[in-house]
Image (cartoon, rainbow, N blue to C red):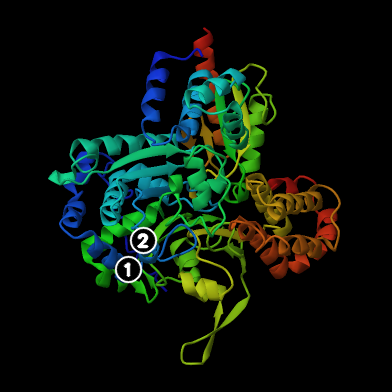
């Protein structure tokens, strides 16, 4: 069967021949037209359109953007800040990178529309430290937009003004967590804040109301202004509107980034038809559907889900539509859209050891269950791979993971325990058999992943 | 504090971006590290004074964020992505290749002072794995062969400079 057609909205110009990331090229393609349209609308009307669109945040949690904006405290008398989360660091995710490098003005326009809608006078783009070129491209784009009165004081001849500054991170994954990001932007260690009371919409940056949105989300806002909330809501599937940038990496023939209407492509179509299937002579074994913290899916397992009319349906991994709700019903998540594929050459103990090393490195250390637990999970999987594996290690790993999730200030606790919980639940036999596997394997093979 | 005139200029400019001076901590540390190569105790004290903070406020930031370093590194910084997608496509072999080419170990300055090779966590370019960041430039699909080519290039540039 032929793969469904991509619907490129956010990635319309990415990799397009002749398209450059400069201001003139953006203007030639109708650039900043939507900002002009937006400033002719009352701000509340734009918020209404975003609410109607059903746009869900593209950073990981899938929280409705319009609801997020609706929670902002507008009566405090304090300034409202917009913070753009461009700290793309969830392993498997590489979508924002291309927007920033190839189409930065699309993001700037989305930011300015969102600032106008929310009466924001100061926005910050928090970009990860490992993207120095991206930071320079954004600074250049802001300067160009400012010179043409698309940002800065008196936007488009109005009395409204808003500045955007680029702020570089310095290599810490936890800064992708919105309250950690705010602490980092305040010049501190990025220890996430406890909610309540520190909901960014009320007590965010400098204890002022703050909106934190993902890069991709803000680009969608620009498109919602273009087509209207109702028309946008018709793209994709109900409660999962719009398009989604899907990033595929690992063991497929054609890894890369693709844009589809949410839920209009299944995992099987994505991996087999779009990405060309497994590498020669290999079979798919497992896939992580939404960034490394999403629970893993095992090829061959099935999911029985309830339909609205009371009947039920059974899905294989290949049948799962790539939307927020079905992936959640299958016990995992759409997360940040990072799809990591593993074939039958991979030992799951070794793959988990790689992931555990990541989370142990990135735990901020604020909450004991996460600081200690992530480190112990790494130590156990490292010992399994490099020293003496024991048949009961799977159960031990699970017991550590079970003591982290739900017991921490931020969602990192879940992010670091879900891989261990799901790997052990779905590949328990492989963990039990690992002592034998290791004896039989060549010494150097295990070094491939950890 | 001995910095280039342009660095001082940029430091004063970036502080104006924030209503609270402390927010400029990360930008100042980046600017100083780009200028000097690392963050010295003197730099920590200087940033603290500049932003009206205590040195501990700056020190705890320097020690938390992986990109800030308190010791010099080699002339070129080779950061190999270690995380899952890159590892699945051979990232560990890529890192081994760089270490071998420069006769060094991860995290150390090579004997010729030319490079520091390091493993880093996800560089957000998983679709072109394995990836390597050399100074500010991202290199994609760096298998062992390409690692050797990049190493030869670095060696050739070093040769030209030393001539």
Name the image quarter holding residue A346: bottom right
Which subunit holds the residue at mark 2?
Answer: A
- Disc 2 crowd, CA 10 A, few/some/many (<14, 14-19, 20+): many
Q: Residue at x 81, y 61 (%)?
A: A396
The residue singled out by tag 1 in the image is A51
Disc assigned to residue A69: 2
- Disc 1 crowd, CA 10 A, few/some/many (<14, 14-19, 20+): many
Q: CA distance from mark 1 to mark 2?
A: 9 Å
Inspect this view and state whether residue A257 appears. Answer: yes
Q: Are marks 1 and 2 in contact (CB under 8 Å)?
A: yes
Q: How far from the left and from the top, in percent, is residue A57?
A: 42, 61
Name the image quarter holding residue B4: top left
Q: Residue at x 49, y 31 (%)?
A: B25
Q: How far from the left and from the top, in percent, is residue A270?
A: 46, 66
Residue A16 falls left or right of residue B1? left
Q: Residue at x 40, y 69 (%)?
A: A262
Q: Residue at x 51, y 51 (%)?
A: A179
Which subunit holds the residue at mark 1?
Answer: A
């Amino acid at each position: 069967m032929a793969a469904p057609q991509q619907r490129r909205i956010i990635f319309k110009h990415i990799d397009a021949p002749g398209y450059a990331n400069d201001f003139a090229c953006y203007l030639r393609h109708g650039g900043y037209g939507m900002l002009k349209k937006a400033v002719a609308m009352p701000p509340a009307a734009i918020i209404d359109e975003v609410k109607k669109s059903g746009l869900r945040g593209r950073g990981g949690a899938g929280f409705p953007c319009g609801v997020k904006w609706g929670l902002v405290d507008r009566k405090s008398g304090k300034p409202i800040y917009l913070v753009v989360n461009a700290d793309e660091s969830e392993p498997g995710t590489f979508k924002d990178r291309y927007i920033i490098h190839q189409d930065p003005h699309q993001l700037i326009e989305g930011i300015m529309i969102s600032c106008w809608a929310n009466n924001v006078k100061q926005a910050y783009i928090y970009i990860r430290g490992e993207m120095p070129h991206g930071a320079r491209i954004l600074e250049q784009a802001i300067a160009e937009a400012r010179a043409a009165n698309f940002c800065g004081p008196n936007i488009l001849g109005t009395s409204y003004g808003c500045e955007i500054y680029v702020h570089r991170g310095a290599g810490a994954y936890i800064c992708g967590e919105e309250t950690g990001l705010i602490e980092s932007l305040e010049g501190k260690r990025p220890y996430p804040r406890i909610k309540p009371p520190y909901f960014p919409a009320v007590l965010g940056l400098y204890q002022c109301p703050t909106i934190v949105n993902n890069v991709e989300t803000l680009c969608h806002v620009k498109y919602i202004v273009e087509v209207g909330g109702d028309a946008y809501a018709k793209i994709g599937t109900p409660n999962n509107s719009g398009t989604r940038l899907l990033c595929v990496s690992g063991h497929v023939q054609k890894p890369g980034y693709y844009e589809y209407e949410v839920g209009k492509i299944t995992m099987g179509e994505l991996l087999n038809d779009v990405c060309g299937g497994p590498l020669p002579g290999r079979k798919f074994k497992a896939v992580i559907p939404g960034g490394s913290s999403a629970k893993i899916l095992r090829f061959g397992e099935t999911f029985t889900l309830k339909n609205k009319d009371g009947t039920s349906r059974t899905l294989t991994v290949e049948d799962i539509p790539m939307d927020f709700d079905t992936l959640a019903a299958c016990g995992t998540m759409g997360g940040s859209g990072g799809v990591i594929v593993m074939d039958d050459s991979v030992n799951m103990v070794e793959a988990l050891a790689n992931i555990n090393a990541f989370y142990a490195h990135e735990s901020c250390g604020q909450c004991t269950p996460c600081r200690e637990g992530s480190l112990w999970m790494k130590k156990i999987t490292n010992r399994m791979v490099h020293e003496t594996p024991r048949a009961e290690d799977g159960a031990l790993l699970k017991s550590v993971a079970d003591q982290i999730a739900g017991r921490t200030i931020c969602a990192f606790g879940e992010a670091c325990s879900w891989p261990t919980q799901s790997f052990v639940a779905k590949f328990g036999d492989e963990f039990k058999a690992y002592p034998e596997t290791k004896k039989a394997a060549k010494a150097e093979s295990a070094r491939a992943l950890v | 504090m001995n910095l280039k005139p342009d660095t001082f200029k940029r430091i004063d400019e970036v502080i104006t971006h924030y209503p609270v001076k402390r927010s400029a901590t990360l930008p100042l540390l980046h600017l100083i590290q780009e200028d000097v190569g690392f963050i010295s105790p003197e730099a920590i004290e200087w940033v603290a004074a500049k932003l009206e903070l205590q040195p501990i406020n700056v020190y705890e930031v320097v020690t938390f964020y992986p990109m800030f370093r308190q010791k010099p590194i080699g002339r070129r910084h080779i950061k190999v992505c270690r995380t899952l997608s890159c590892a699945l496509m051979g990232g560990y072999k890529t890192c081994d290749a760089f270490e071998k080419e420069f006769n060094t170990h991860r995290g150390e300055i090579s004997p010729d002072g030319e490079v520091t090779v390091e493993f880093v966590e996800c560089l957000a370019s998983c679709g072109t794995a394995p990836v390597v960041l050399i100074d500010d430039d991202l290199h994609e699909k760096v298998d062992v062969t390409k690692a050797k080519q990049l190493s030869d290039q670095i060696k050739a540039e070093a040769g030209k400079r030393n001539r």
